[in-house]
Each structure stands twice: as structure tokens, then as C-alpha cells.
């Protein structure tokens, strides 16, 4: 009896690195597979403590958190370590899936745009969640380039 191989699908993801052409910074991504209300509260608290604009949305199998503020590597590492210790997940934080799964609907649960925002990153999510406000003030960060990648997944 042969074992069936899982179906693979190519999807588009966003890497957690951004550049303005002079320096590299990091974006905080976090996935919660079986989040509790307490987990989401912890996530909100850390985003506030580390002064990160963010959005949190529900997907087919859990919750995604996307930081919209570029971080120095030390700030990113500290934040990711805190999350791993307080809300342990088997997730590297390197890439977040942008492609939707078949039949997937996504629901914006919360957001905070009170800190600097990479405008082209916010624009990607505004297409998905049109009720997100357009941010036009001194905290808009323009000229940052995002890094996309294609990868194969069996999680369809």
C-alpha cells in the first residue's frame, strides 16, 4: 500500500525583511494556530510596548499578526523571543503567506496605526480590508521595498 503524497500548491509570501536602499530592517509576523483571548491580549500588549503599528486578522486555520513598522534586528529579535516564550508557536516568523487558501475568507480583527507605517505594505492589506484607513501624516514611511517569495505548501 503506497502512501499518498500531500497536494502541493505554490503560494506567494512576504519576507520579514525590508530595505530603503541604505539599510535592512525587519517586520514582525506571528501566526497563532489555536489562539485564546489571552494570547491575543498578550500580542496587543507587546505591539504597544514595542511601538509597532500592526493588524491582526483571522484566517482559515488561525490568526495572523503583521507588524507594519520596520524594526532594527535587536528590536525584532527581542519581540519575537518574547512572543515565543509567552505564546509558543511552531513558526519561524520569516515569511507570511499572502495568497489565500481555497475558499478562505479573512476577517480583520484589530489594528493600530499609531506608529510609523510602511505605506506600500499597508496598501497590500487595504486591498484585502478596504475599511483600513489611509494613513497620510509624518508617520508614513515611503521608499521601503518589500521582499516577496513563492513557496510550495501542502496546507491548502
Image: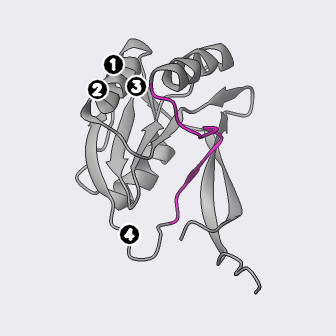
Determine contact: label 1, label 2, CB under 8 Å: yes
Local crowd size for mark 1, using a 10 Å CA cut-off: few (<14), some (14–19), many (≥20): few
Main secondary structure type of the part rendered in magenta: loop
Task: Give the camera-side residue of 21 and 68.
Answer: 68
What is the C-alpha distance between the residues marked 4 and 2? Answer: 25 Å
Compare marks 4 and 2 and give the one earlier in the sequence. Answer: 2
Q: Which residue is mark 3?
A: 139
What is the C-alpha distance between the residues marked 3 and 4? Answer: 32 Å
Q: Nearer the viewer, mark 1 or mark 3?
A: 1
Q: How many marks?
A: 4
Residue under the image location 63 percent in, 19 percent down: 77
What is the C-alpha distance between the residues marked 3 and 2? Answer: 25 Å
Q: Nearer the viewer, mark 3 or mark 2?
A: 2
Answer whether residue 77 is magenta in the image: no
Residue 84, x across and y down, in percent: 54, 25
What is the C-alpha distance between the residues marked 4 and 1? Answer: 28 Å
Determine contact: label 1, label 3, CB under 8 Å: no
Tag 2 secondary structure: helix
The magenta-colored residue range is 87-99
- Residue 104's disc is 4
Amino acid at each position: 500500500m503506497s502512501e499518498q503524497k500531500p497536494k502541493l500548491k505554490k503560494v506567494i509570501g512576504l519576507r520579514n525583511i525590508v530595505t530603503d536602499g541604505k539599510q535592512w530592517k525587519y517586520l514582525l509576523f506571528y501566526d497563532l494556530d489555536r489562539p485564546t483571548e489571552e494570547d491575543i491580549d498578550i500580542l496587543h500588549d507587546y505591539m504597544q510596548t514595542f511601538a509597532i503599528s500592526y493588524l491582526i486578522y483571522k484566517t482559515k486555520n488561525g490568526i495572523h499578526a503583521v507588524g507594519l513598522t520596520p524594526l532594527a534586528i535587536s528590536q525584532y529579535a527581542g519581540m519575537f523571543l518574547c512572543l515565543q516564550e509567552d505564546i509558543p508557536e511552531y513558526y519561524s516568523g520569516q515569511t507570511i503567506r499572502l495568497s489565500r487558501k481555497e475558499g478562505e475568507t479573512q476577517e480583520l480583527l484589530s489594528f493600530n496605526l499609531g506608529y510609523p507605517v510602511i505605506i506600500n505594505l499597508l496598501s497590500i492589506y487595504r486591498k484585502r480590508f478596504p475599511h483600513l484607513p489611509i494613513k497620510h501624516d509624518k508617520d508614513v514611511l515611503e521608499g521601503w521595498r518589500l521582499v516577496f517569495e513563492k513557496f510550495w505548501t501542502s496546507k491548502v
